[in-house]
Image (spheres, helix red, strand yellow):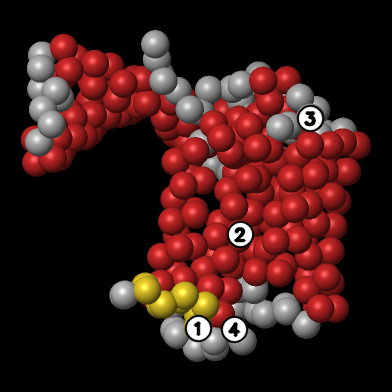
């Protein structure tokens, strides 16, 4: 069975999936910038909670979305834990066992990074799982007026990204069939992983080279181009953008009223 984490799933048929691709990209950009400007956990927590409610209202199951990309979820949790361990040890001691020393300030820093990471990931996952790369290319070229050469190259890369997961799965099966991945030795497993990674890299370079030659031969690097589809915007696009802006504003106001709002330059 092929593995493609970026394949369009049930969320593509939801109300959010019917939004214009450019709208979702702009909303993701606005939320990301807004979250990168703060470093307190209060604002991030409010924004994350509102994002969960917003996705639910637009027909997407946020927890199912996070579960589908569970490696990112685990990475975010580990980031918060490691930050709590290595951050400056100021404030009162919360936990001290051996080399593990966590204080109130280091714990707050870890929670802030963890929640901010989750709040940053969620809009990006919505964009990935509900957007056809072709529609995103149409919006970038016709609405954002980006160069056609760049848009078509990015579209080709997005199309091939999911294929890389399938090829990784196929390479793993082939190596296990030859008995190369059956060893219990940690060193052998690391060597097997390195070999599989190198094989995937070689395949990616070859495929990219062939694709570049093919696109150039068909005139994709020429002058102005025409487009088969015209991006369509609706009231839902405006509503979604306003909801995303409202999410940030509510997060800022709530933290400001409680006295926890902290900007990155403070």
Q: Which residue is mark 3?
A: 59
Q: CA distance from mark 2 to mark 4?
A: 19 Å
For mark 4, give the secondary structure: loop
**Sequence-wise first label, 1 or 2:** 1
Q: Which residue is mark 2?
A: 115
Q: Is residue 145 visible?
A: no
For image coordinates 65% across by 37% down, the residue present is: 63
Q: CA distance from mark 3 to mark 4?
A: 37 Å
* Number of other residues with Cα within 10 Å of mark 3, as a class: few under 14, some 14 to 19, many 20 or more: some
Seen from the viewer's position, the closer of residues 219 and 255 is: 255
**Sequence-wise first label, 1 or 4:** 1
Q: Which residue is mark 4?
A: 265
Seen from the viewer's position, the closer of residues 168 and 222 is: 168
For image coordinates 13% across by 40% down, the residue present is: 186
Q: Which residue is mark 1?
A: 93
Circle nearer the viewer, 2 or 3: 2
For mark 3, give the secondary structure: loop
Circle nearer the viewer, 3 or 1: 1
Seen from the viewer's position, the closer of residues 166 and 225 is: 166
**Sequence-wise first label, 2 or 4:** 2
Seen from the viewer's position, the closer of residues 255 and 238 is: 255
For image coordinates 18% across by 30% down, the residue present is: 196
Vertical arrangement, residue 100 with respect to residue 8, above or below: below
- Whether residue 180 sits left or right of residue 248 in the image: it is left
Q: Mark 3 and 1 residues: CB-CB less than 8 Å, in contact?
A: no
* Number of other residues with Cα within 10 Å of mark 4, as a class: few under 14, some 14 to 19, many 20 or more: few
Vertical arrangement, residue 246 with respect to residue 190, above or below: below
Measuring from the top left, give residue 92's x and y in whole percent. Answer: 54, 87
Q: Mark 3 and 4 residues: CB-CB less than 8 Å, in contact?
A: no
């Amino acid at each position: 069975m092929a593995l493609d984490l970026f394949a369009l799933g049930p969320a593509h048929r939801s109300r959010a999936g019917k939004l214009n691709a450019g709208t979702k990209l702009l909303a993701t950009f606005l939320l990301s910038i807004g979250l990168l400007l703060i470093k307190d956990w209060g604002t991030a927590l409010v924004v994350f909670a509102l994002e969960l409610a917003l996705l639910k209202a637009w027909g997407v199951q946020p927890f199912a979305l996070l579960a589908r990309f569970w490696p990112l979820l685990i990475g975010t949790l580990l980031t918060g834990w490691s930050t709590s361990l290595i951050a400056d040890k100021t404030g009162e001691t919360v936990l001290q066992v051996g080399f593990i020393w966590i204080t109130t300030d280091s714990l707050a820093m870890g929670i802030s990074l963890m929640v901010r990471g989750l709040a940053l990931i969620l809009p990006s996952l919505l964009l990935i799982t509900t957007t056809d790369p072709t529609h995103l290319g149409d919006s970038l070229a016709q609405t954002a007026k980006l160069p056609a050469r760049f848009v078509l190259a990015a579209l080709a890369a997005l199309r091939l990204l999911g294929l890389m997961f399938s090829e990784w799965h196929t390479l793993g099966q082939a190596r296990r069939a030859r008995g190369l991945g059956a060893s219990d030795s940690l060193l052998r497993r690391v060597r097997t992983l390195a070999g599989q990674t190198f094989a995937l890299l070689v395949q990616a370079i070859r495929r990219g080279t062939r694709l570049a030659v093919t696109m150039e031969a068909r005139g994709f690097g020429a002058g102005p181009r025409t487009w088969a589809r015209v991006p369509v915007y609706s009231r839902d696009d405006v509503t979604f953008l306003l909801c995303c802006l409202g999410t940030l504003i509510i997060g800022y106001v709530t933290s400001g009223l409680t006295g926890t709002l902290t900007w990155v330059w403070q």
